[in-house]
Amino acid sequence: MKSVSNHLILKLLAAATLAGALSACAPLVVGGAVVSGMVATDRRTSGAQLDDESIELRGANRISDAMGSRVRVNLTSYNRQVLLTGEAPNQADRQRVEQIVAGMDNVRAVVNELVIMDSPNLQQRSADALVTGKVKAAMVDSKDVFANTFKVVTERGTVYLMGRVTQREADRATEVTRGVSGVRRVLRILEIISEAELQSLQLQPDTPAQAPAATPRQ
Protein backbone atom coordinates (compact mmCIF):
# COMPACT_ATOMS: atom_id res chain seq x y z
CA MET A 1 0.00 0.00 0.00
CA LYS A 2 1.29 3.45 -0.86
CA SER A 3 2.38 5.67 1.99
CA VAL A 4 0.08 8.47 3.13
CA SER A 5 0.75 11.67 1.19
CA ASN A 6 1.96 14.83 2.87
CA HIS A 7 -1.28 16.52 1.83
CA LEU A 8 -3.36 13.91 3.64
CA ILE A 9 -1.17 14.15 6.72
CA LEU A 10 -1.70 17.92 6.79
CA LYS A 11 -5.46 17.45 6.52
CA LEU A 12 -5.51 14.91 9.33
CA LEU A 13 -3.52 17.30 11.49
CA ALA A 14 -6.07 19.97 10.64
CA ALA A 15 -8.83 17.64 11.80
CA ALA A 16 -7.05 17.12 15.10
CA THR A 17 -6.55 20.86 15.47
CA LEU A 18 -10.24 21.49 14.80
CA ALA A 19 -11.21 18.90 17.39
CA GLY A 20 -9.16 20.74 19.98
CA ALA A 21 -10.66 24.04 19.02
CA LEU A 22 -14.21 22.75 19.20
CA SER A 23 -13.67 21.10 22.56
CA ALA A 24 -12.87 24.54 23.96
CA CYS A 25 -16.57 25.37 23.51
CA ALA A 26 -16.01 28.38 21.27
CA PRO A 27 -19.31 29.59 19.77
CA LEU A 28 -20.11 28.58 16.21
CA VAL A 29 -22.78 29.77 13.79
CA VAL A 30 -25.14 27.21 12.25
CA GLY A 31 -27.93 28.35 9.98
CA GLY A 32 -27.81 31.83 11.47
CA ALA A 33 -27.93 30.57 15.08
CA VAL A 34 -25.06 30.49 17.53
CA VAL A 35 -24.27 26.93 18.64
CA SER A 36 -21.74 26.11 21.32
CA GLY A 37 -18.53 24.25 20.53
CA MET A 38 -19.67 21.47 22.87
CA VAL A 39 -22.72 20.89 20.71
CA ALA A 40 -20.68 20.95 17.53
CA THR A 41 -18.20 18.45 18.93
CA ASP A 42 -20.42 15.88 20.63
CA ARG A 43 -24.18 15.98 20.97
CA ARG A 44 -24.44 13.09 23.42
CA THR A 45 -24.92 13.69 27.11
CA SER A 46 -21.90 13.14 29.33
CA GLY A 47 -23.65 10.07 30.72
CA ALA A 48 -24.17 8.63 27.24
CA GLN A 49 -20.52 9.21 26.38
CA LEU A 50 -19.41 7.30 29.46
CA ASP A 51 -21.90 4.52 28.74
CA ASP A 52 -20.62 4.24 25.17
CA GLU A 53 -17.03 3.84 26.35
CA SER A 54 -18.11 1.22 28.87
CA ILE A 55 -20.23 -0.66 26.32
CA GLU A 56 -17.34 -0.86 23.87
CA LEU A 57 -14.91 -2.13 26.50
CA ARG A 58 -17.27 -4.59 28.20
CA GLY A 59 -18.66 -5.78 24.89
CA ALA A 60 -15.25 -6.55 23.45
CA ASN A 61 -14.29 -8.49 26.57
CA ARG A 62 -17.52 -10.49 26.64
CA ILE A 63 -17.29 -11.39 22.96
CA SER A 64 -13.68 -12.45 23.39
CA ASP A 65 -14.52 -14.59 26.43
CA ALA A 66 -17.46 -16.28 24.71
CA MET A 67 -16.22 -16.59 21.14
CA GLY A 68 -12.44 -16.57 21.34
CA SER A 69 -10.73 -16.02 18.02
CA ARG A 70 -13.56 -17.49 15.93
CA VAL A 71 -14.88 -14.03 15.13
CA ARG A 72 -13.38 -10.62 14.42
CA VAL A 73 -15.73 -7.97 15.76
CA ASN A 74 -15.42 -4.20 15.82
CA LEU A 75 -17.92 -2.82 18.32
CA THR A 76 -18.80 0.87 18.03
CA SER A 77 -21.31 2.48 20.39
CA TYR A 78 -22.92 5.88 19.88
CA ASN A 79 -25.61 7.15 22.24
CA ARG A 80 -26.03 3.56 23.51
CA GLN A 81 -26.70 2.20 20.01
CA VAL A 82 -24.15 -0.41 18.97
CA LEU A 83 -22.79 -1.08 15.49
CA LEU A 84 -21.20 -4.50 14.96
CA THR A 85 -18.83 -4.84 12.01
CA GLY A 86 -16.34 -7.53 11.12
CA GLU A 87 -16.64 -11.23 10.29
CA ALA A 88 -18.06 -14.45 11.70
CA PRO A 89 -17.57 -18.00 10.37
CA ASN A 90 -21.28 -18.87 10.36
CA GLN A 91 -24.77 -17.51 11.02
CA ALA A 92 -24.98 -19.04 14.49
CA ASP A 93 -21.85 -17.20 15.64
CA ARG A 94 -23.09 -14.00 14.00
CA GLN A 95 -26.35 -14.18 15.95
CA ARG A 96 -24.55 -15.17 19.16
CA VAL A 97 -22.42 -12.02 19.04
CA GLU A 98 -25.55 -9.89 18.64
CA GLN A 99 -27.24 -11.63 21.55
CA ILE A 100 -24.23 -11.02 23.80
CA VAL A 101 -24.23 -7.30 23.04
CA ALA A 102 -28.02 -6.88 23.13
CA GLY A 103 -28.07 -8.39 26.63
CA MET A 104 -25.67 -5.83 28.06
CA ASP A 105 -26.77 -3.04 30.38
CA ASN A 106 -27.53 0.33 28.75
CA VAL A 107 -27.57 -1.03 25.17
CA ARG A 108 -30.77 0.24 23.55
CA ALA A 109 -30.26 -1.08 20.01
CA VAL A 110 -27.86 -3.23 17.97
CA VAL A 111 -27.14 -2.88 14.26
CA ASN A 112 -25.53 -6.16 13.18
CA GLU A 113 -23.38 -5.68 10.09
CA LEU A 114 -21.20 -8.75 10.67
CA VAL A 115 -20.63 -10.74 7.48
CA ILE A 116 -20.02 -14.46 7.14
CA MET A 117 -16.58 -14.72 5.58
CA ASP A 118 -12.89 -14.96 6.42
CA SER A 119 -11.27 -11.95 8.08
CA PRO A 120 -9.55 -9.48 5.72
CA ASN A 121 -5.79 -9.39 5.48
CA LEU A 122 -3.66 -6.65 6.97
CA GLN A 123 -3.52 -4.79 3.65
CA GLN A 124 -7.31 -4.51 3.45
CA ARG A 125 -7.61 -3.44 7.08
CA SER A 126 -4.93 -0.80 6.54
CA ALA A 127 -6.78 0.42 3.45
CA ASP A 128 -9.97 0.75 5.51
CA ALA A 129 -8.14 2.76 8.17
CA LEU A 130 -6.84 5.07 5.46
CA VAL A 131 -10.34 5.55 4.05
CA THR A 132 -11.61 6.51 7.51
CA GLY A 133 -8.87 9.12 7.81
CA LYS A 134 -9.61 10.48 4.35
CA VAL A 135 -13.34 10.75 5.10
CA LYS A 136 -12.69 12.69 8.30
CA ALA A 137 -10.25 14.97 6.49
CA ALA A 138 -12.78 15.55 3.70
CA MET A 139 -15.40 16.56 6.26
CA VAL A 140 -12.97 19.11 7.69
CA ASP A 141 -12.23 20.41 4.20
CA SER A 142 -15.93 20.77 3.40
CA LYS A 143 -16.29 23.66 5.90
CA ASP A 144 -20.02 22.96 6.32
CA VAL A 145 -19.82 19.62 8.16
CA PHE A 146 -18.93 19.35 11.85
CA ALA A 147 -16.54 16.42 11.47
CA ASN A 148 -16.49 15.68 15.19
CA THR A 149 -20.24 15.10 15.38
CA PHE A 150 -19.77 11.91 13.35
CA LYS A 151 -18.25 8.57 14.19
CA VAL A 152 -16.77 7.03 11.05
CA VAL A 153 -16.21 3.27 10.70
CA THR A 154 -14.92 1.58 7.53
CA GLU A 155 -15.09 -2.12 6.67
CA ARG A 156 -14.07 -3.44 3.24
CA GLY A 157 -14.72 -0.04 1.66
CA THR A 158 -18.15 0.42 3.26
CA VAL A 159 -18.27 3.55 5.40
CA TYR A 160 -20.68 3.71 8.34
CA LEU A 161 -21.66 7.13 9.67
CA MET A 162 -22.98 7.44 13.24
CA GLY A 163 -24.11 10.55 15.08
CA ARG A 164 -26.96 12.85 16.17
CA VAL A 165 -27.44 15.23 13.25
CA THR A 166 -30.03 17.11 11.28
CA GLN A 167 -31.23 15.84 7.90
CA ARG A 168 -29.24 18.63 6.28
CA GLU A 169 -26.06 17.51 8.02
CA ALA A 170 -26.73 13.84 7.22
CA ASP A 171 -27.19 14.53 3.52
CA ARG A 172 -24.14 16.77 3.29
CA ALA A 173 -21.90 14.32 5.17
CA THR A 174 -23.10 11.50 2.92
CA GLU A 175 -22.31 13.56 -0.16
CA VAL A 176 -18.83 14.37 1.11
CA THR A 177 -18.14 10.74 2.05
CA ARG A 178 -19.24 9.38 -1.31
CA GLY A 179 -16.73 11.68 -2.99
CA VAL A 180 -13.76 10.11 -1.18
CA SER A 181 -11.64 7.66 -3.15
CA GLY A 182 -11.82 4.11 -1.84
CA VAL A 183 -15.41 4.42 -0.58
CA ARG A 184 -17.62 1.72 -2.12
CA ARG A 185 -20.84 2.62 -0.32
CA VAL A 186 -22.13 4.63 2.63
CA LEU A 187 -24.47 3.37 5.35
CA ARG A 188 -26.00 5.93 7.70
CA ILE A 189 -26.78 4.82 11.24
CA LEU A 190 -27.84 8.26 12.34
CA GLU A 191 -30.28 9.80 14.78
CA ILE A 192 -32.01 12.61 12.91
CA ILE A 193 -32.88 15.68 14.95
CA SER A 194 -34.61 18.87 13.85
CA GLU A 195 -32.86 22.18 13.32
CA ALA A 196 -34.77 23.47 16.35
CA GLU A 197 -33.48 20.58 18.47
CA LEU A 198 -29.96 21.33 17.32
CA GLN A 199 -30.28 24.93 18.45
CA SER A 200 -31.81 23.92 21.78
CA LEU A 201 -28.85 21.68 22.61
CA GLN A 202 -26.78 24.75 23.38
CA LEU A 203 -29.25 25.65 26.14
CA GLN A 204 -29.53 22.15 27.60
CA PRO A 205 -26.35 20.34 26.53
CA ASP A 206 -26.73 17.52 29.05
CA THR A 207 -30.40 16.65 28.52
CA PRO A 208 -30.74 12.87 27.98
CA ALA A 209 -31.26 11.98 24.34
CA GLN A 210 -34.49 10.12 23.63
CA ALA A 211 -34.10 9.58 19.90
CA PRO A 212 -35.48 6.30 18.54
CA ALA A 213 -33.10 3.61 17.34
CA ALA A 214 -31.70 4.43 13.92
CA THR A 215 -31.67 1.96 11.03
CA PRO A 216 -28.97 1.73 8.36
CA ARG A 217 -29.72 3.83 5.29
CA GLN A 218 -27.68 4.20 2.17
Image: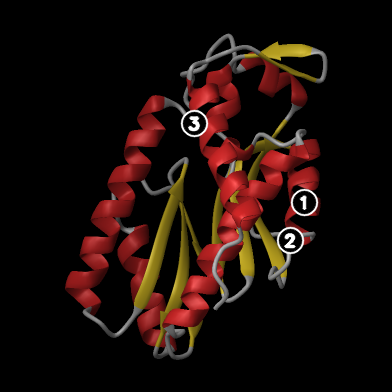
Q: Position of residue 55 (x, y in %)?
A: 32, 49
Of 217 and 147, nearer the camera is 147
Q: Are marks 1 and 2 in contact (CB under 8 Å)?
A: yes
Q: Do the residues labelled 3 and 2 touch (CB within 8 Å)?
A: no
Residue 135 vs 92, above or below: the answer is above
Q: Rounded to the nearest whole Å, what is the CA distance between mark 1 and mark 2?
A: 7 Å
Residue at position x 69%, y 16% in the image: 199
Of 84 and 11, nearer the camera is 11
Looking at the picture, the colour scheme in use is secondary structure
Which quarter of the figure has residue 28?
A: top right
Q: What residue is disc 1 on?
A: 176
Residue 9 vs 180, above or below: the answer is above
Q: Is residue 214 in view?
A: no
- Please tell me whether mark 1 sits on a helix, a strand or a loop: helix
Q: What residue is disc 2 on?
A: 180
Q: What residue type is labelled 3?
A: Arg
Residue at position x 63%, y 56% in the image: 134
Q: Position of residue 80 (x, y in %)?
A: 43, 44
Q: In this view, does 138 lie to the left or right of 113?
A: right
Q: What residue is disc 3 on?
A: 44
Q: In this view, does 188 lie to the left or right of 42?
A: right
Which quarter of the figure has residue 131?
A: bottom right
Q: Is residue 80 left or right of residue 64?
A: right
- Please tell me whether mark 2 sits on a helix, a strand or a loop: loop
Label 2 packing within 10 angstroms: few (<14), some (14-19), many (20+): some
Residue 26 vs 64, above or below: the answer is above
Q: Position of residue 114 (x, y in %)?
A: 48, 75
Q: Rounded to the nearest whole Å, what is the CA distance between mark 3 and mark 2?
A: 27 Å
